[in-house]
Amino acid sequence: MRSFASPLPAFLTLAVLASSTFAQGNFSSDAVGASPIFTDVPPVGVADPYVIAAITQKLALYDIAIDTKNFSALSGTFATDVVANVAPVPITSLAAYEAFLQADLAGSRTKHTTDTVFVSNIEPYTAQSISYSDAIYFGRGSALGQQFTFYERFDDVWSKDKVDGSWKISERTLVFFVCVDEASFF
């Protein structure tokens, strides 16, 4: 299993550098991209915008597939041999991941949103991304009228299909932050 080298520290440093660069009136991407902090993250302006757009679209497809319960559409986002670290025991195929999600979401009305995506380490056939997601479950039965919001992050390793050129997740790791019950605020 490939380890995920998190670009988050470099991303946060980039945000600070960009803020100070913009505050000084220097809007050149070279001023930020030339920083020595980039050891595992491509400098600004070097990352392939087409790869970033393709990966962002695939993450949106995940949200739509989950909310519409069209689990077969997950094949557009995940490799058939995906390793999903989203449960106590890793899930080691797309078919098993689809079955896990189908059972987990059975009878649930949901709204998933991927609101931040950072793509890095883009190579000819691999890339990595960190994405933040909110998953809202709308209560039923005794919980009718309530909503439960899960805040989470996905660390994904992407592989480019050598035949059709599409990007798919080959490894996914869920970082779960918290679940908030709307009723607990009132």
Image (cartoon, rainbow, N blue to C red):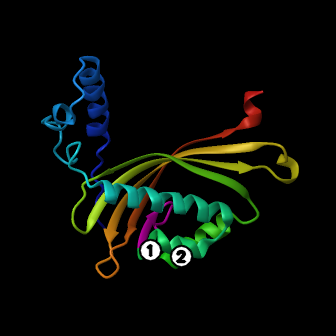
Q: Is residue 72 left or right of residue 129?
A: right
User: Which residue position holds label 2?
Assistant: 96
Mark carried by residue 92? 1
Let me know if residue 84 is in the magenta part: yes
How would you classify the magenta stretch by its main secondary structure? loop
Residue 106 position within the rendered picture, expressed as x and y whole percent measured from the top left: 72, 66
Question: Are the two marked residues, 1 and 2, in contact with CB atoms closer than 8 angstroms?
Answer: yes
State the CA–CA distance, disc 1 to disc 2.
Answer: 7 Å
Q: Is residue 35 left or right of residue 116?
A: left
Q: The disc labelled 2 sits on which kind of residue?
A: Ala
Q: The disc labelled 1 sits on which kind of residue?
A: Thr
- Crowding around mark 1 (Cα neighbors within 10 Å: few <14, some 14 to 19, many 20+) is some
Q: What residue is drawn where x is 79% and y is 49%?
A: 139
Q: Which residue range is magenta in the image?
A: 82-91
Q: What residue is drawn where x is 83% and y is 53%?
A: 140
Badge 2 marks a residue whose secondary structure is helix
What is the quadrant of residue 13 in the picture? top left
